[in-house]
Image: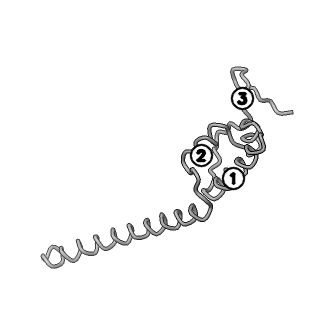
């Protein structure tokens, strides 16, 4: 049996972790769908959260953050974020190239 009591003797939640598990957006959307199905059947939110391995607060935060976003939209958003980061790196590289060429043209090479 696991000891759920912390250093002060208070009971700690089994979901509380020092290393937080990060969920990919696709996983969040999938879990929100599961939560919606369970809640529609009348399952209490505390039980739904427990079955998904997250806290009630996390479910509420996910709902606020992701709303009614579907899995495809989240995947597309992630692709766009990657592309945006790639383009930002490309612009930064080009700015460096321009700066170097300006210095060469001035004779400060």
Mark nearer the N terminus (3 vs 2)? 3
Under circle 2, the secondary element is: helix
**Residue 46 in the image: above or below residue 65:** above
In front: mark 1 or mark 3? 1
Q: Is residue 62 above or below residue 91?
A: above
Identify the coloring: one colour
Label drawn at residue 63: 2
Q: How far apart, in angstroms, are the residues tagged by discs 2 and 1?
A: 10 Å
Q: Which residue is mark 3?
A: 12
Quarter of the figure with the N terminus? top right
Query: Which residue occupies 63% across, 59% down?
Result: 26
Image coordinates of residue 88 in percent, x first then y, are: 38, 67
**Spot occupied by residue 99 in the image (x, y as percentages of width and height):** 23, 71
- Up the image or down, 46 lies above or below 28; here it is above
Mark sitting earlier along the chain (1/3): 3
Q: Earlier in the sequence, mark 2 or mark 1?
A: 1
Residue toward you, 76 or 53: 76
Q: Residue furthest right?
A: 1
Closest to the camera, between mark 3 and mark 2, is 2
> Which quadrant of the rendered structure holds the C terminus?
bottom left
Q: Position of residue 31 (x, y in %)?
A: 69, 51
Q: Residue at x 67, y 38 (%)?
A: 55
Front-most of residues 62 and 38 = 38
Report x, y in % for residue 107. Answer: 13, 77
Helix, strand or loop at disc 1? Answer: helix
Q: Residue at x 61, y 59 (%)?
A: 70
């Amino acid at each position: 049996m696991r000891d759920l009591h912390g250093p002060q003797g208070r009971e700690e939640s089994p979901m509380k972790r020092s290393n937080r598990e990060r969920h990919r957006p696709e996983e969040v959307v999938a879990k929100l769908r599961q939560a919606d199905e369970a809640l529609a059947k009348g399952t209490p939110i505390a039980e739904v959260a427990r079955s998904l391995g997250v806290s009630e607060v996390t479910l509420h935060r996910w709902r606020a953050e992701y709303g009614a976003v579907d899995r495809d939209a989240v995947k597309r958003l992630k692709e766009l974020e990657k592309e945006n980061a790639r383009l930002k790196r490309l612009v930064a590289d080009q700015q460096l190239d321009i700066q170097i060429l300006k210095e060469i043209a001035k004779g400060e090479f």
